[in-house]
Amino acid sequence: MGGYGELHFNRDLGGGGDNTVDFHRWVLFLNHSFSDRIKLYSEFELEHSLAGDGAPGEVELEQAYIDFTLDHGLNAKAGLFLLPLGLLNETHEPDTFFGVERNRVESNIIPTTWWEAGVGATQTLDNGLGWDLAIHSGLNLPTSGSNAFRIRSGRQKVAEAAAEDPAVTARVRYNGVPGLSLSAFAQYQNDVTQTTSDEDNSAFLVGGTAVYQAGGFGLKALIASWNIDGQSFEDNGADHQWGGYLEPSYTWTIGTDQRLGVFARYSHYEYARGIGNVGGGTFDQYDVGVNYWPIDNVVLKADYSHIVDEDDEVESLLNLGVGYSF
């Protein structure tokens, strides 16, 4: 058994938005070993503390798959699993990253947390190279309404999901240099609208990550880009949606158990820019903040976000949080 949770306080310093406090996620892992080679991994989540009619939250099954350990560092799996994309999608416990909220590139371009149903394989080699490959259910992007053409709104969460057009995801990894981790990933789906229309809505996602750690100094970088075919996507400025960020940080060890870390992050992202999309557009975001770990797996966080859109409208946010994992 394991799990994690995080409580967030968000204050709009510009006065134009709401100030909220929210127990954003409460998550339970329940895993089981049927044998040395066959295991179950599962993840159950309650979002926003309360679910039901008129409530803001959801109850979700984010992972439920059988893992098969094979020879030569090879594993296979079947079921419902997180896709091997980006930095946060597979590892997003609050004590493992800087910032109260998950960064917006990995919320809107890579729609973390993103899980699908299917089969996959992964292998790590002795020379530091590794690879992942999965064939799975795909997105179902809406083409009307306030969230039309938005990648995040296309997640079906494997809930009676349309399965007309599956997708394939691949990633290569390199960890052969101490302190350095690199990856490149791609996904293809023949039709991200899951329809039988004559419009070609094939979609291709490509991206890469880099993580470097030398003592207390850390540096993370990510870029991800969607290219989506179809006249309707082009007309709504949604045929090319992309983003990236650069995040330097420094962490000090205090005594034997405590750590204190500071970070800065610059992000640029463009998504679903059509006039019918609430919240879409082109953005530059600047974040600074601090994490304090009184002990491993427990973290207190504070950060400030300054966000500028293509119309030079500014959003300033103060975020506070507490999180844990076990």
Image (cartoon, rainbow, N blue to C red):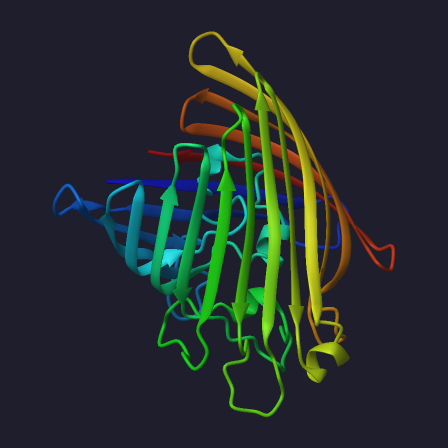
Which one is in front, 287 or 199? 199
Name the residue: 69% across, 48% down: 244
Residue 151 in percent (x, y) is at: 59, 66
- Number of marks present in the image shown: 0
Name the residue: 29% across, 41% down: 72
- Specify the quadrant of the image occupied by residue 16: bottom right
Name the residue: 75% across, 74% down: 274
Vertical comparison of 155 with 48: above or below: below
Q: Quadrant of the C terminus?
A: top left
Which one is in front, 61 or 245? 245
Residue extending farthest left = 35
Query: In the picture provided, is 51 more to the left or to the right than 234?
Result: left
- Specify the quadrant of the image occupied by residue 52: bottom left
Residue extending farthest right = 312
Query: In the picture provided, is 139 more to the left or to the right than 210?
Result: left
Residue extending farthest top = 255
Name the residue: 41% across, 23% down: 296
Vertical comparison of 150 with 6: above or below: below
Query: In the picture provided, is 90 more to the left or to the right than 248?
Result: left
Residue 203 in percent (x, y) is at: 59, 71
Residue 275 in percent (x, y) is at: 76, 75
Q: Quadrant of the N terminus?
A: top left
Residue 160 in percent (x, y) is at: 35, 77
